[in-house]
Structures are given as structure tokens and as C-alpha cells.
Image (tube, rainbow, N blue to C red):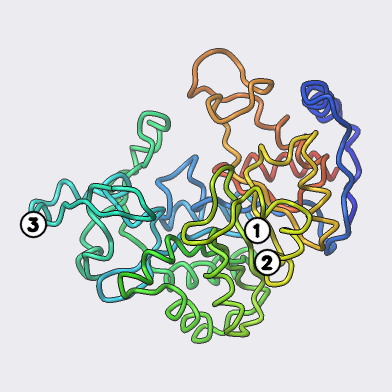
Amino acid sequence: MSFQHPRRRSVLLATAAVSAAAAAPAVASGPREKRRGPLVIGHRGAAGWRPEHTASAYTFAVRSGADWIEPDLVPTKDHVLVVRHENEISGTTDVARHPEFAGRRTTKTVDGRAVTGWFTEDFTLAELKTLRAVERLPLVRDRNTVFDGREPVMTFQEVVDLARALSREHGRRIVVFPETKHPTYFRSAGLPLEPELIRLVRRNRLTARDCVVQSFEPSSLREIAAARLGLPLWQALGTSGGPFGHPVTYADMMTPAGLREIASYARWIGPDKSSLVPPLTLLADAHAAGLEVGAYTFRAENQFLPAVYRKGAAPNDFGDAFAEYAFHFGQGVDAVVTDFPDLAAAARDDFTA
């Protein structure tokens, strides 16, 4: 559907500010499925308000208006899919405070980069369940540290079960939006993500109304597509370089020809929000290729906002997040991936009023 620019003063000001800065006109929308407005996707739950990938983060996201919730998938030693932003877990759990696991601290090369810490693939699920989640950005989101140590690491199955419970509670279908993390790395380690994800999709009878799978690596999505699960796929796109283990750059993937190739196996692209600001034409080009576009990652703190939306000089203070949402809604994005789904949902209410 084609979104119309809102008449609200804040939206007009936001659009004018960015358009002036970019010196370019608005991008036209292409045809997409009908809905009440852009989808709100809770990034790792509601990472702005709770430690990420916890039951409370996912629950907060849904209760504040998220349509989808995002679990990042990594495996355990016994090949159970758990939800962590990375397989290295020293920043998101209290593993460093467990003397019994001190000897498992090591350095590994993950996607060509040396990483030191503790890794999910070196722990059984039972061992991981003895750990507790902590805030990943304590210096940015000190408010969230009050929840440190309260919740265990979740499995993907537990997220699916929670999504179904929340769907019943709220009378609307909550979509789970798993990302396969470092799939080439895990394949080489003998712990491939895709077969276990496919098994769980089939076991839970997840349909296109329940689950959308994302990855930065096309080979992972193509493997999911080959299983003929009927699930929509989302090709995530970085801002530089290319997907690990693939002879293509993100810049190539974002050309009209690259987008047509993505459309042969995926329904969505997920670019960084900066890739959608005029004079860049990615949004229009993707819609022309028949793709829907979900932008990431929206955050409220000044340091994560474009300069035009910042308020004051303190990097961790909130800026004008509503104006940024308004601008991207006005341009015609189909979804926003956000740490603050409550703010995104409120901005959408303004936009669709």
C-alpha cells in the first residue's frame, strides 16, 4: 500500500528537516500488502527497556505494541538453539562471575575476527541455564541494570511458546522473527543452524503468519527456502563489506539487479536506516523489485540518532525519536526494527491517525 505523508506538524517538520539536509525529494512507495501502518518489530524484545533476549523484554515489546519479536539464534554444545545477540556471552550474561566456567574463556575466530570470551557452543543447555542475563550496554542504559541477574537464557522453543501465549493474551498474532547468526561459522564448527531451525518450524507447525526468518548470509536463507516451509525470508543488509563467506558486497546487493536477485528467494530486505535517506533510492528500488523494506535499528538515545534529531549534548539522553520515525514512515518503509517498540507504536498511531 502507498503511505500518505501525515498532516501532523511534527511529521512535516521532521520530513522537511531531513529533506533539506539531504537536498532530495521524498521516495515514492511501491505496492505492498495491506496493513494499518508500518510493522513494529521489537529488536531483541524491547532492548531499550530490559536486558535483551529475555522473557520480560519480549513481553514488554508485545504489551507496548510490537507486531513481531526478534530472537537471534546461536547453538549450544548439544545443538540446542538459544537466543543471544552473539555466541560470545560475556557481555549479555553473568558467565564471568561463575568460577566453575573460568577455564572456558578462550579466543576464537568468528567470521574472520578474533573474539575473546565465553561461547555458547562450549556449553550444554543445562550449563547455560545456570547463567543469568545482564544488560549489554550498562553505560548507555544504566536503568536496565536493575534487572541484571533475574532471567535465564532462553531457547528458541521458549520464545515460540511465549509468542503464542502473548498472542492469546492480546488477541492478535505475534510473529517470531529469528535471525541465523554466523551461519557459515557454525556450519564449519559442525553445529549448523538451519537443520535445527527447520526441525523446530515443522515441529511447531509455524506458518507465514507465525514466523519470518532473517539472515545477513544469503546461503542461510537459500537453505531455509529449499526446505519449502512457506515462510517469508528477510535478507538483512550491512552498510559496508559483504556477507561473510559470500563473493558479493552489500553495495552490489542493493543495486536494482541485486535486489531482483534477492527477490528470487526473499520477500523482505532489512537495510540500516541510513541506507534509506534520500538521495539514496534503495527504498524505491526495493519496492520496484517487489520487496518489502524493514529498516534497522531505531533507538532513542542521541548517540544513535542522526544529528538533526538530537537534543542537547549528552549522548545517552533521549533525542527526538518521534521525528525520526515520522520521517521514515513518511518515506514509505514497511517495518521498523526498534529497541523501543513503545515509542515506535506511539509514532505509528500518530502517523495513521
Instruction: State the residue position of label 3.
Output: 100
Identify the residue shown where x is 74% and y is 52%.
255
Q: Which mark is residue 67?
A: 1
Question: What residue is rendered at 39% in x and 38% in y?
Answer: 144
Residue 236 figure quarter: bottom right
Looking at this rendering, what residue extends furthest in the front direction?
A: 247
At label 1, counting other C-alpha atoms closer than 10 Å, the crowd grade (few under 14, some 14-19, many 20 or more) is: many
Q: Residue 272, position in %: x, y?
A: 62, 44
Task: Give the mark nearest the N terminus, 3 or 1.
Answer: 1
x, y percentage for residue 12?
Answer: 86, 27
Discs 3/1, front: 3
Q: Secondary structure at mark 3?
A: helix
Q: Is residue 271 above or below residue 298?
A: below
Q: Position of residue 317 (x, y in %)?
A: 52, 22
Q: Which residue is mark 2?
A: 172
Residue sitting farthest toward the top = 313
Q: Using the numbered discs, state the Cα–Cα distance from disc 3 to disc 1 in whole angstroms.
A: 40 Å
